[in-house]
Amino acid sequence: MQQQSNSVIKSHLHPRNKHRNGYHFAELIQTLPELSPLVKQNQYGNRSIDFADPIAVKLLNKALLLHYYQLSYWDIPNDYLCPPIPGRADYIHYLADLLAQDNQNQIPTGKQVKVLDIGVGANVIYPIIGCAEYGWSFVGSDVNPKAIKVARLITQANSLLKGSLQCRLQPASSAIFRNIIKPREFYLLTLCNPPFHASAQEALASTHRKLKNLGKFNHPNQKAILNFGGQQAELWCQGGESAFISNMLTESVTYKRQCLWFTSLVSKKESLAVIKQQLKQISAVESSIIPMAQGQKKSRLVAWTFFKSDERQHICKDVSGELYV
């Protein structure tokens, strides 16, 4: 099954999401002509690409980033995560709404809004969207040295990101905030798209299901082509996403005065029971689970804070947070 292009408003996406009206391929091809040969009419009579083709997916992402998000250059190595941009944009917009709740319904904007992206990846999608949409500044961490190297190249090649994105290598694979959050640093937000599979086998099985749904059969013993790519740390970890987020919740206690809102995507509904139990154990002052959707895929983000409402309102007025560190 292929995705429709621009015939139907995607009402499940956030109201501020630039992609609610689908992909306008004529405009995207004008921005990136090399996308043109890969755009064809699908079974619905709409212009689209083959979403099982990693080259087509990568070029679509590049066109979207250059056309909508003020980039002049973007490229990632083969087999690195190439995520669907509309869903990533939704996460950023919902985080903006989260901050607005503590700021008289006004979204804080500008470089003084500091955000930590755990697992920034080679693609640096979240900082790109956050910088373009709200002018925020980011620190991006990753355990993969090559991903950090590519992320830094993209940063240096784009005026949007220069001075707004700092990439830090996480030297300890088991650590999340440790080694990354420095003394006296304060973030209004952390975000994370955790590896949600529990093993390489589970990740591969998921890929086969995606290919089958896209009409591309793969024999179980054949090495699957990942249409959205992904390295090990991007796709799976011991215990899957519930274990990863549980570790994140535990570690957040150490840095509870250095971040206004900790957040993470939660892909699997089954993970919520463990997460809710952990939220009680760490004595979060307030938490929220915000539903999200992209097409038929439903997900959600979990947010928690150790600051009371009146403290959060003061911090949003003085986003440095220096009084609280």
Image (tube, helix red, strand yellow):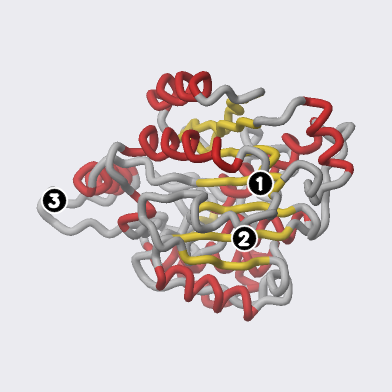
Kindly identify the residue that appears in the image at 38 percent across and 58 percent down.
172
Residue 139 is labelled as: 2
Q: Which residue is mark 3?
A: 219
Relative to 9, say whether 144 is above or below.
Answer: below
Q: CB atoms at circles 3 and 1 under 8 Å apart? A: no
Q: Calculate the distance from the C-alpha at mark 3 to the C-alpha at mark 2.
A: 41 Å
Q: Position of residue 266 (x, y in %)?
A: 47, 34
Amino acid type for the residue under numbered disc 2? Val
Q: Name the front one of labels 1 and 2.
A: 2
Q: Quadrant of the C terminus?
A: top right
Element type where label 1 sits in the image:
helix
Residue tagged by mark 1?
Answer: 92
Image x and y of residue 229, in percent: 36, 59
Number of callouts:
3
At x 48% / y 75%, what residue is drawn? 149
Specify few, some or many for label 1: CA neighbours under 10 Å numbering under 14, 14-19, or 20 or more. Answer: many
Mark earlier in primary sequence (3, 1): 1
Numbered disc 3: secondary structure:
loop
> Residue 219's x, y, as percent?
13, 51
Please tell me how crowded label 3 is: few (under 14), some (14-19), or many (20+) other residues with Cα within 10 Å.
Answer: few
Residue at 62% x, 67% y: name it. Answer: 166
Q: First in sequence: mark 3 or mark 2? A: 2
Looking at the image, the residue that sits furthest to the left is 221
In the drawing, does residue 44 fall left or right of residue 32? Answer: left
